[in-house]
Image (cartoon, rainbow, N blue to C red):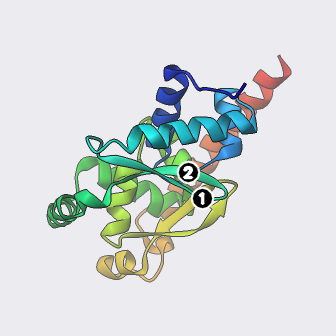
């Protein structure tokens, strides 16, 4: 008898993919949802079928490593129009905050930005990428690592992040923050 994922599993999978923004590995999905490899494949297939309904605006993109949500190509004109308008607007407080964190603490993963801000930063990072203010510079585990772009530095008239105001003091704050986090994790693991 083949596995049929529950509505709860499908809804949890959709929520995880929305939060991730980028590709979420099948291994991570299995771990987070307590599913076997075969159950993950079945859940992804079921979600893909669910999203294939023409009334849905999203689709599931699958690779060998994992999957992610994306907008359907039938909405390309709307998405392009939205993105062009978004790029024309001034930076919001959220994008400014995120850009500052990446400038002072980068290269940094999105999950670390989320941790510091206390909210999901997927869309603000996507906006900053589209504006050319930040760039992906590799991966740390299954997460992309971001830093400010050369265009960002050029716009500010500096040649490197180290020339930003109070750069060293913020780097030291960042180091202390994550050292405290590691100490807290080690202490909770020992309990």
Residue furthest out toward the front: 1
Q: Name the residue under label 2.
A: 67
Residue 169 x %, y %: 52, 56
Looking at the image, is 146 positioned above or below residue 141?
below
Q: Position of residue 128 (x, y in %)?
A: 35, 63
Position of 143 relative to 186 (above/below): below
Label 1: few (<14), some (14–19) or many (≥20) C-alpha neighbours in 10 Å: few
In-front residue for pair 183/95: 95
Between marks 2 and 1, how big is the CA–CA gap? 6 Å
Position of 126 with respect to 181 (left or right) is left
- Please give the name of the residue rendered at 73% of the width and 24% of the height, measured from the top-left corner: 1
The C terminus, quarter of image? top right
Task: State yes or no: discs 2 and 1 in contact (Cβ < 8 Å).
Answer: yes
Above or below residue 77? Residue 180 is above
Q: Nearer the viewer, residue 16 or 52?
A: 52
Front residue of 161 and 2:
2
Numbered badge on residue 63: 1
């Amino acid at each position: 008898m083949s596995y049929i994922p529950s509505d709860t599993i499908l809804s949890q999978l959709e929520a995880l993919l929305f939060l991730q923004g980028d590709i979420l590995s099948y291994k991570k999905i299995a771990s987070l949802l307590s599913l076997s490899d075969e159950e993950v494949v079945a859940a992804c297939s079921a979600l893909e079928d669910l999203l294939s309904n023409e009334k849905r605006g999203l689709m599931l993109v699958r690779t060998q490593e994992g999957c992610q949500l994306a907008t359907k190509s039938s909405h390309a004109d709307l998405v392009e129009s939205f993105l062009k308008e978004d790029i024309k607007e001034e930076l919001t407080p959220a994008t400014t905050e995120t850009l500052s964190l990446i400038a002072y603490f980068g290269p940094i993963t999105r999950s670390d930005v989320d941790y510091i801000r206390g909210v999901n930063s997927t869309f603000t990072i996507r906006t900053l990428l589209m504006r050319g203010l930040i760039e992906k510079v590799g991966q740390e585990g299954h997460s992309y690592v971001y830093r400010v772009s050369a265009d960002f530095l050029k716009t500010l008239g500096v040649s490197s992040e180290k020339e930003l105001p109070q750069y060293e003091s913020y780097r030291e704050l960042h180091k202390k923050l994550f050292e405290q986090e590691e100490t807290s994790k080690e202490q909770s693991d020992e309990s």
